[in-house]
């Protein structure tokens, strides 16, 4: 769990990364590299989990560690390509945090951001299918 200071740092760095100055400063690049490293560590942890249900629980536990980055990115509203924010959108869907998934998804779709290659679909398709298909399955039973 992040401390309030860590969360604030993530928010500020995500907002700064969102400023369109044309060049990243070393601090901004380092902040993005840190959050990307954190994402890679989390993904590595998830690879060790085989059950989809257990992965969803782990993603729900991991999402708060990225809360500052999410809020800062959404606040900056610059649409800069960011693998972290698009991955976190999918995680929010996977763990059933639909309000968060839709908040991030609105940003991702509005700015036409691409998902990382391993998803193989665009953001709108992922949101639609991953949210609606389980509901349609439940409705059919």
Image: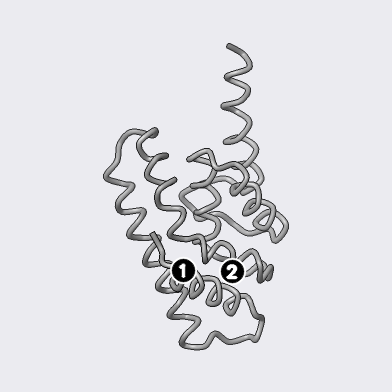
Who is closer to the viewer here, 121 or 40? 40
| Left or right position of 27 against 77 | left
Q: Nearer the viewer, mark 2 or mark 1?
A: 1
Picture residue at 36% right of the left edge, 53% below the top: 43
| Crowd rating for badge 1 (residues with CA inside 10 Å; few <14, some 14–19, many 20+) | few
| Left or right position of 138 against 10 | right
The C terminus sits in image quarter: top right
Q: CA distance from mark 2 to mark 1?
A: 14 Å
The mark that comes first in sequence, 2 or 1, is 1
Q: How is the image coloured?
A: one colour
Residue 137: image location, x then y, percent: 58, 20
Q: Secondary structure at mark 1?
A: helix
Picture residue at 59% right of the left edge, 79% below the top: 16
Residue 121: image location, x then y, percent: 57, 45
Q: Which mark is residue 111?
A: none
> Mark 2 and 1 residues: CB-CB less than 8 Å, in contact?
no
Is 81 above or below relative to 20? above
Mark count = 2
Residue 26: image location, x then y, percent: 46, 87
Task: Quickly name the residue at label 2.
Answer: 72
Q: Quadrant of residue 80?
A: bottom right
Q: Quadrant of residue 115?
A: bottom right
Who is closer to the viewer here, 92 or 44? 92
Residue farthest to the top? 141
Residue farthest to the front? 4
Picture residue at 45% right of the left edge, 77% below the top: 31
Task: Quickly name the residue at label 1.
Answer: 4
């Amino acid at each position: 769990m992040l401390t309030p200071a860590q969360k604030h740092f993530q928010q500020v760095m995500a907002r700064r990364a969102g400023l369109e100055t044309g060049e990243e400063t070393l601090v901004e690049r380092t902040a993005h590299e840190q959050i990307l490293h954190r994402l890679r560590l989390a993904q590595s942890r998830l690879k060790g989990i085989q059950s989809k249900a257990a992965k969803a629980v782990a993603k729900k536990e991991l999402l708060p560690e990225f809360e500052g980055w999410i809020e800062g990115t959404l606040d900056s509203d610059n649409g800069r390509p960011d693998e972290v924010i698009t991955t976190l959108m999918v995680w929010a869907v996977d763990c059933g945090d639909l309000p968060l998934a839709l908040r991030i998804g609105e940003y991702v779709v509005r700015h036409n951001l691409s998902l990382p290659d391993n998803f193989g679909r665009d953001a709108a398709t992922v949101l639609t299918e991953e949210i609606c298909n389980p509901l349609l399955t439940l409705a059919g039973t």
